[in-house]
Image (cartoon, grey):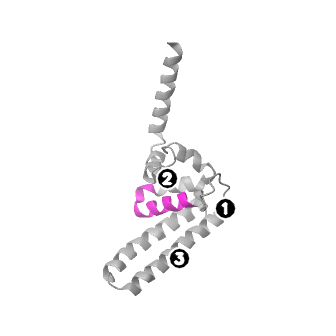
Amino acid sequence: MEQKEILKNVIESLSNYYEKQKSFKRVFLNEPVMSKAVEVFDTGMNEMVDHIFDLIGIPNEESSDNKYETSNWTKRVLTNLIDIAAKEEKYIESTIELISDWKNLSDYTSKVESHTWFGYRQLLDEHITGFKKWHEELREKEKGKGKSKTV
């Protein structure tokens, strides 16, 4: 099975899980034991995603200049993208493409980030449109630089 097909199946499985989870929570809203069961299943689903990342070759540890950053930035971002794609079908293909090109993830996030944060949905929306907004803003900045040099 091809990597992209596996990723799509994982996202669809997670989507199905979330649908079942909604029903489960509705039925067992006031049952603390059942709420704990949901937490256990959530942990299992997150472990499945981590195993997929291991198969893809995403390292468990990253070198970071931020001594306060203890989690793996790449895995955290990709996990959030998978989570969004599982809940919103229109993001599945973009999520798969971004995961497949995980080594260049910081290049993609730099196109939508503002200082030290970026919106996951914004990243996926921009990826769907081919980062048109980012390219337009870059062109405007370059035009502005060109005008200031000629004055």
**Amino acid marked by disc 1:** Glu
Q: Is residue 84 magenta?
A: yes
Q: First in sequence, mark 2 or 1: give its number.
A: 1
Q: CB under 8 Å between callouts 3 and 2?
A: no
Marks 2 and 1 sit apart, C-alpha to C-alpha, by: 25 Å
* Secondary element at tag 3: helix
**Amino acid marked by disc 2:** Ser
* Secondary element at tag 2: helix
Q: Tell me which residue sits at (55%, 60%) in the image.
A: 76
In depth, the one of 118 and 67 nearer the eye is: 67
Binning the other alpha carbons within 10 Å of mark 2 as few (below 14), some (14 to 19) or many (20 upward) gives many
Q: CB under 8 Å between callouts 2 and 1?
A: no
Q: First in sequence, mark 3 or 2: give its number.
A: 3
Q: Position of residue 26 (x, y in %)?
A: 31, 78
Residue assigned mark 2: 94
Q: Which residues are magenta?
A: 76-91
Marks 3 and 1 sit apart, C-alpha to C-alpha, by: 21 Å
Marks 3 and 2 sit apart, C-alpha to C-alpha, by: 24 Å
* Secondary element at tag 1: loop
**Amino acid marked by disc 3:** Gly
Q: Position of residue 118 (x, y in %)?
A: 48, 49
Residue assigned mark 1: 61
Q: Position of residue 39 (x, y in %)?
A: 46, 78
Q: Is residue 145 left or right of residue 87?
A: right
Q: Is residue 34 magenta?
A: no
Q: Which numbered marker is on residue 44?
A: 3
